[in-house]
Image (cartoon, grey):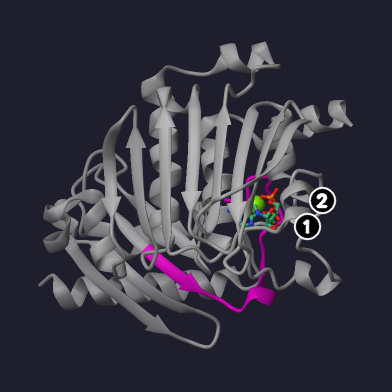
Amino acid sequence: DHVANQIAAGEVVQRPASVVKELLENSVDAGSTDIKLIVKDAGKTLIQVIDNGKGMNVTDSRLCFERHATSKIRHAEDLFALATKGFRGEALASIAAIAHVEMKTKQEQEELGTHIVIEGSKFVSQDVAVLPKGTSFSVKNLFFNIPARRNFLKSDTVEFRHIVDEFERVALAHPNISFVLYHNGSEMFNLPMANQRQRIVGIFGGRTNEKLVPVNESTEIVQIQGFAVKPEFAKKSRGEQFFFVNNRFIKSGYLHHAVMAAYEGLLKDGCQPGYFIYLEVPPNTIDINIHPTKTEIKFDDEHALYAILRSSVKHSLGQFNV
Ligand code: ADP
Ligand code: MG
């Protein structure tokens, strides 16, 4: 029903960047190796994501817009072993409730694909179409039916910055996928398949390379990989600070504190180091379902994690920065 859709939509979709995040994560989940993001007017006019993933058959291409119809939580234990990023099964239903959405999708083994137009939760058309393998979502006129939300949006500069933030997070989490981002017809990012280090440099520029110190640690409760920025390159502003847990971007004040503790005595006053830390933990030792946008996470053994992270970063800084 439309009212429920619009209410839920407001929780999932706060701004154009929320749509970008959900669409990009869906494309990643679909096993894509190549993902294009095309944006106009900071997403206020158009957000399009084109992937080469597994696509959907006719039935699923309609069902994917139904709330929870495609939720991946099929068994209770899935809640505790959340392997894929999407799990609530309501992002597309929410987006379709508050925008004009056009979807084109085709699976490899099918000869023809499906083209669906849905506006404010109403199916406008559904056709058979000649399409390449993969899926394309176009989201136009976001919040067309919630003027208060539309008026609440910030300037294009601010909204586009949020989009870039989401794009960078997904691109950093998946260096083995190629990504491009166009804004108003200009190519803003072009990131070929890469390793972690190359991906970081691809996003933040060639001069980043010399600033990075590798961080590596392997214990029973966590595997840590990634890079910390040498203390002499720390900035007055927050700089680039990223944690990924099981290939998902997360925010953690607690883990940030652990990294800061590793830099103790190495930073000039008020300076903040950059870092790109990838943690792998057993899925049953974390709880991701504590925040609707899933950027926060709870660890079973956060004290141990803190200690391991602090000492591994500290060790790396000591080794590479004498
Ligand atoms: P969730 O990702 O939480 O399952 P969504 O509303 O984001 O919920 O997506 C619903 C479903 O639509 C997904 O579970 C997936 O089966 C399908 N889907 C969405 N985007 C894509 C895509 N780009 N390629 C293939 N399937 C997709
Ligand atoms: Mg999803």
Label 2 crowd (10 A; few <14 / some 14-19 / many >=20): some
Q: For this rendering, which residue is in front, 316 or 247?
A: 247
Label 1 crowd (10 A; few <14 / some 14-19 / many >=20): some
Mark 2–mark 1 distance (CA, rounded to whole Å) = 5 Å
Q: Which quadrant is home to the C terminus?
A: bottom left
Q: Residue at x 27, y 39 (%)?
A: 188
Q: Does 283 lie within the magenta span?
A: yes
Q: For this rendering, which residue is in front, 189 or 221?
A: 189
Tag 1: amino acid: Ser
Q: Which residue is mark 2?
A: 68
**One can see residue 260 in this view:** yes
Q: Residue at x 27, y 77 (%)?
A: 315
- In the picture provided, is 191 more to the left or to the right than 120? left
Say whether mark 1 is within 8 Å of ligand 1: yes
Q: Which mark is residue 63?
A: none
Q: Which residue is mark 1?
A: 71
Label 2's element?
loop
Tag 2: amino acid: His
Q: Residue at x 31, y 49 (%)?
A: 240
Q: Position of residue 243 (x, y in %)?
A: 44, 59
**One can see residue 257 in this view:** no
Marks 2 and 1 in Cβ contact (< 8 Å): yes
Q: Position of residue 200 (x, y in %)?
A: 27, 58
Question: Residue farthest to the bottom?
Answer: 220
Q: Position of residue 191 (x, y in %)?
A: 29, 55
Q: Which residues are magenta?
A: 277-295
Quadrant of the rendered image containing residue 37: top left
Quadrant of the rendered image containing residue 116: top right
